[in-house]
Amino acid sequence: MAELEPAPEQLSSPRGTPLTALSWADVQTRVAEAEDFLLATTDPDGRPHVVPVLGVSLEGTVCFVTFRNARKARNLVRNNGCAVTVPGHDVDFVLEGAAHLIRNAARLQKVADLFPAKYPWWHPFVRAGEFYDPADTALNDPRHVYAVEPAQVFAFGKETGFSATRWRF
């Protein structure tokens, strides 16, 4: 998530119990360690498009990879506003913000280096400033890598009254 330390705002309903024990550092750690991410973008007609993606945390953002002509990539060209849901066993997180295409080769390399640590079966690589799937040995299909910079993050507790907390940047 972003480098700033946002203050939590409790959003619980009268019956909910605020997540007072969950610090911003906890949120960052849980999101960084998560393996499941759901990306929500908006189709041209306004309908939502939600898909699972592999994600890694880098410099306050959540990064994901996609085919250049994938529906989510086309949606982000038109409207980079999106949400990333990170399900957890006791708390679900929703990061709302903007997705930015990563073009810097050094940053692409950092993202490529993070994926095998989290997903040992996937070893993407960067060649000549482009990001590739390991199966693309002919270098015919470079991928887009996006970094989602959150504007606000929500935590929804699944225990003790379905509590909710928000952090804004």
Image: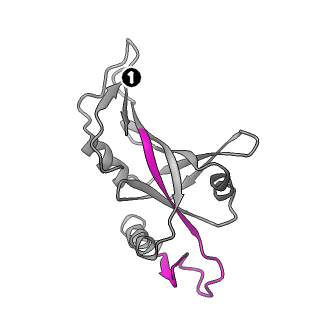
The magenta segment is 123-152
The verdict on residue 143 being magenta is: yes
Give me the residue at 35% from left, 49% from top.
2
Locate the C terminus and report the quarter of the image it occupies.
top left
Instruction: Verify whether residue 146 appears in magenta.
Output: yes
What amino acid type is highlighted by mark number 1? Leu
Taking 127 as reference, is 89 left or right?
Answer: left
| Residue depicted at 63% across the width and 48% down the height | 79
Say which element carries label 1.
loop
Residue 148 image point, x, y percent: 48, 52
Which quadrant of the structure image shows residue 58?
bottom left
Q: Nearer the viewer, residue 55 or 43?
A: 43
| Residue under numbered circle 1 | 11
Q: Name the residue located 71 percent from the left edge and 39 percent from the top edge.
A: 47
| Quarter where residue 17 is shown | top left
- Is 136 above or below relative to 102? below
Answer with left or right where residue 41 lies relative to residue 28. right
For the residue pair 9 and 117, the one nearer the viewer reads as 9
> Whole-percent x and y of residue 111?
42, 68
Residue 9 position (above or below residue 89): above
- Residue extending farthest right: 45
The residue depicted at 49 percent of the width and 44 percent of the height is: 97
